[in-house]
Image: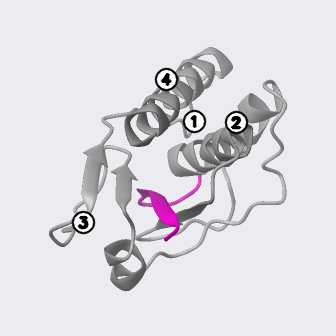
Amino acid sequence: MTTTLAFVCVQNAGRSQMATAFAERERDRRDLEYDILTGGTHPADSVHEEVVDAMREVGIDLADRTPCAVTDEELARADAVATMGCSTLTLPDGVESHDWALDDPDGKSPEEVAAIRDEIERRVTRLFDSLD
């Protein structure tokens, strides 16, 4: 059975996009059969430009990503869901939940966005370590 991880925030335009990209990279590095899901409760029109720039600095291109909605049904099928400190989601029993209290990178300086990005990368790596 495939493990499903979900990364969710309100707009799906910053933190959850970064977390998803790091999770995809980590999954590939570890050669795991994980499904990675991302979405927002009220998706924005595009990924924040400062997030695209910050991820480009670490060799990840988010320019072609588009924020999307996530459904309760999709989240209920996930094995673990990480929210970015902005969620009011109620998850069913059996879904491992992580609420990562992270600042919103929207409108922040490049240095602030880089610090948020680096913290997200650390948390994604720890999540994979805990599931391994």
Q: Nearer the viewer, residue 108 or 4?
A: 4
Q: Secondary structure at mark 2?
A: helix
Residue drawn at (52%, 43%) of the image: 15
Residue 90, quarter of picture: bottom left
For marks 4 and 3, give the CA distance.
Answer: 22 Å
Q: Secondary structure at mark 3?
A: loop
Residue drawn at (83%, 44%) of the image: 61
Q: Which residues are magenta?
A: 1-14
Q: Which residue is mark 2?
A: 50
Q: What is the residue that sits farthest to the bottom in this orientation?
A: 73
Residue 80, quarter of picture: bottom left
Which mark is in front, 1 or 4? 4
Q: Which residue is mark 1?
A: 107
Tell me where residue 85 appears, x and y as whole percent: 31, 43
Q: Amino acid at mark 4?
A: Glu
Residue drawn at (38%, 45%) of the image: 84
Which mark is in front, 4 or 2? 4
Which mark is in front, 1 or 2? 2
Q: Amino acid at mark 2?
A: Glu
Marks 1 and 4: CB-CB under 8 Å?
no
Marks 2 and 3: CB-CB under 8 Å?
no
Tell me where residue 35 appears, x and y as whole percent: 58, 64
121 w.r.t. 41: above or below: above
For marks 1 and 3, give the CA distance.
Answer: 25 Å
Residue 30 lies in magenta, yes or no? Answer: no
Q: Which residue is mark 4?
A: 119
Q: Which residue is mark 3?
A: 89
